[in-house]
């Protein structure tokens, strides 16, 4: 009976560790994807601001 309990406990620990690892990797991947999206949005916004400024400067010439 104790052997079965130990074996079950060990299997459960392995399953929990694997789920934890997979979840951690998924969270990291999601965070990196979100960071890339935010950086791209920021870069696009900065480019638009630059182009608007350039357009205004050219109109003044």
Image: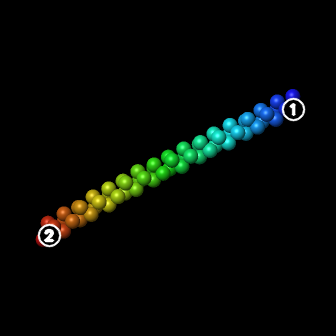
Tag 1, which secondary structure?
helix
**Residue positioned most to the bottom:** 61
Left-right relation of 19 to 8: left
Rendering coords of residue 3 (x, y %): 85, 32
Left-right relation of 29 to 18: left
Q: Residue at x 68, y 39 (%)?
A: 16
Could you say which disc has been placed on residue 60 in the image?
2
Rendering coords of residue 35 (x, y %): 45, 53
| Image quarter of residue 1 | top right
Q: Residue at x 82, y 35 (%)?
A: 6
Q: Between 14 and 44, which is closer to the camera in this rendering?
A: 14
**Residue positioned most to the top:** 1
* Mark 1 nearby-residue class (10 Å; few <14, some 14–19, many ≥20): few
Determine which residue is flagged by label 1: 2
Rendering coords of residue 44 (x, y %): 32, 56
Q: Residue at x 51, y 47 (%)?
A: 29
**Residue positioned most to the left:** 61
Tag 2, which secondary structure?
helix
Rendering coords of residue 8 (x, y %): 77, 32
| Image quarter of residue 47 | bottom left
Q: In 3D space, how far apart are the residues under numbered discs 1 and 2 (Cα atoms)?
A: 86 Å
* Quadrant position of the C terminus in the picture: bottom left
């Amino acid at each position: 009976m104790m052997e079965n309990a130990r074996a079950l406990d060990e299997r459960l620990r392995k399953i929990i560790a694997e789920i934890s690892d997979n979840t951690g990797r998924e969270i990291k991947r999601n965070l990196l994807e979100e960071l890339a999206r935010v950086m791209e949005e920021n870069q696009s916004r900065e480019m638009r601001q630059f182009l608007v400024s350039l357009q205004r400067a050219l109109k003044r010439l």
